[in-house]
Image (tube, rainbow, N blue to C red):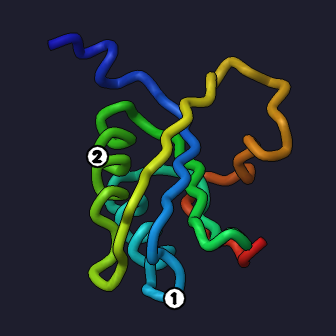
Amino acid sequence: MNLTLESENKKIKIVVIGKVQGVAFRYYTKMKADELGLTGSVQNMEDGSVVIFAMGQKKQIDVMTAWCHIGSPASYVSEVLVHEIRIEDTQLSSDDEMPPSERFIILRAS
């Protein structure tokens, strides 16, 4: 086991598709992110998906990604798309920006 890799920070964008709106998915996502010590945001999108930006240690990001396949108790997740964002990138597109924060927040629907 490589402790250096386990403790490295990782930044991701997750798109969750399925019955994920109107089922407290964002609320449960925030609870899970807070439990894992992640920073970032979760937001409902117009197309019915939910988008999550998260940053934290690789192990916690992996746990969050796995949780997204299950979701909130009333949700039905049909697909989870994960895109890693290089932390070194200073020029991010507006679609890949995370709100500057030291906590995990729920954003209003786009």
Q: Which mark is residue 98?
A: none
Please report contact status of discs 1 and 2: CB closer than 8 Å, yes or no: no
At label 1, which amino acid type do we have? Gly
Residue 92 coordinates in the image, percent (x, y):
80, 32
Density class for disc 2 (Cα within 10 Å; few <14, some 14-19, many ≥20) is few
Q: Is residue 61 above or below residue 104?
A: above
At label 2, which amino acid type do we have? Val
Residue 4 coordinates in the image, percent (x, y):
32, 13
Asked whether, in this view, residue 2 is left or right of residue 64, the answer is: left
Which element is circle 1 on?
A: loop
Spatial distance from mark 1 to mark 2, Cα to Cα? Answer: 23 Å
Residue 66 coordinates in the image, percent (x, y):
29, 49
Residue 7 coordinates in the image, percent (x, y):
34, 24
* Mark 2 lies on residue: 63
Name the residue at 55% across, 53% down. 15
Name the residue at 70% across, 48% down. 98
Quarter in which the C terminus is drawn: bottom right
Q: Of label 1 and label 2, which has the lower sequence position? A: 1
* Mark 1 lies on residue: 22
Density class for disc 1 (Cα within 10 Å; few <14, some 14-19, many ≥20) is few
Question: Residue extending furthest left?
Answer: 1
Q: Is residue 15 above or below residue 61?
A: below
